[in-house]
Image (tube, grey):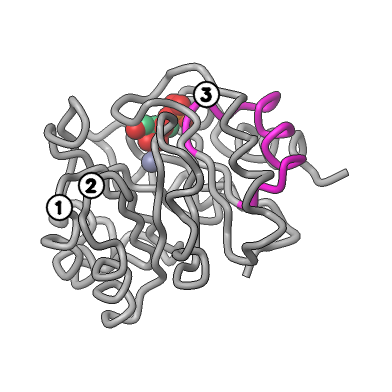
């Protein structure tokens, strides 16, 4: 796990939902590696977005891995539905559940890749004892809930902390653009989630290439 090639995972949170299928085909054509799907329940975060129905709807549209980010309370309750809808990776928040081990087991029992995520205010030490069980760690670089926020560079200390002892994917999400992408990859990040920096641009392929080339490992 982990990867030499920086992976770009555009977040559909910033896509045009009136044309979601076309938008996903466009990022695939533009060279995206994964499709990042931000799920919010209005409880864990002060925003409501989408559920398993959308995952099921977009599954036939693309062959790219569907990277589902659950910003929901009690995520274990929904893992089976998201897995059955066609998710490839399912990531939930450590702050949203009593037993992360239970959530990880549920994801793996469905044959999917398991990820855990922490908010900016959560200490990286909460992941001690979990790193060996997951395929991915998502370090939030904004307060979860909305796209278009500013990158919190201090979160890269969490990436540097786990990099030497975790060989899975390290993903960051929030405020990623050409400048911040380079800093993130230099810190050891494998997967860049970007909403505004891709869907806010005219040419998605150019935007994805700019992120990738801007972040090329030294
Ligand atoms: C926050 C969301 C956003 C989104 C990316 O909860 O998860 O971080 O994916 O938003 P941008 O790339 O626009 O900051
Ligand atoms: Zn996300």
Is the shortest distance between ligand 1 and the CB of mark 3 under 8 Å?
Answer: no
Is the C terminus in the top left, top right, bottom left or bottom right quadrant? Answer: top right
Give coordinates of residue 19: x percent, y percent.
Answer: 27, 38
Highlighted range, magenta: 173-190
Residue under pointer 1? 74
Is residue 15 visible in the rendered image? The answer is no
Say whether residue 168 is left or right of residue 121: right
Is the residue 65 above or below the residue 180 in the image? below
**Ligand 1 visible in quadrant:** top left
The Cα–Cα distance between marks 2 and 1, rounded to whole angstroms, is: 6 Å
Where disc 3 sits, the SS reads: loop
Q: Residue at x 66, y 33 (%)?
A: 181
Residue 65: image quadrant is bottom left
Q: Nearer the viewer, residue 112 or 61?
A: 112
Residue ID at (35%, 56%): 91
Q: Residue furthest right?
A: 218
Q: Residues within 10 Å of mark 2 (few under 14, many from 20)?
A: some
Q: Is residue 56 visible?
A: yes
Residue shown at 69%/62% (left/top)?
A: 3
2 and 1 marks in contact (CB < 8 Å) = yes
Q: Which mark is residue 201?
A: 3
The residue indicated by pointer 2 is 96
Residue 20 in the image: state x and y as whole percent. Answer: 28, 42
Circle nearer the N terminus (3, 1)? 1
Q: Is residue 125 above or below residue 57?
A: above
Q: Position of residue 22 (x, y in %)?
A: 35, 44
How far is the residue under mark 3 from the one under mark 1? Answer: 35 Å
């Amino acid at each position: 796990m982990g990867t030499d090639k920086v992976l770009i995972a555009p977040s559909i949170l910033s896509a045009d939902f009136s044309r979601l299928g076309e938008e996903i085909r466009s990022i695939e054509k533009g060279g995206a590696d994964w499709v990042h799907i931000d799920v919010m329940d209005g409880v864990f975060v002060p925003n409501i977005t989408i559920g398993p129905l959308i995952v099921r709807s977009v599954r036939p549209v693309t062959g790219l891995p569907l990277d589902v980010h659950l910003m929901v309370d009690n995520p274990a309750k929904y893992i089976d539905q998201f897995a059955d809808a066609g998710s490839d990776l399912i990531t939930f928040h450590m702050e949203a559940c009593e037993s992360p081990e239970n959530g990880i087991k549920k994801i793996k029992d469905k044959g999917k890749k398991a990820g855990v995520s922490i908010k900016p205010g959560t200490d990286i030490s909460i992941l001690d004892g979990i790193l060996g069980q997951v395929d991915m760690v998502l370090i939030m670089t904004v307060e979860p809930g909305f796209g278009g926020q500013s990158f919190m560079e201090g979160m890269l200390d969490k990436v540097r902390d786990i990099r030497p002892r975790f060989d899975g994917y390290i993903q960051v999400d929030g405020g990623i653009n050409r400048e911040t992408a380079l800093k993130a990859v230099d810190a050891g990040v494998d997967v860049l989630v970007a909403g505004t920096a891709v869907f806010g641009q005219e040419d998605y392929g150019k935007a994805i290439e700019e992120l990738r080339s801007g972040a090329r490992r030294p």
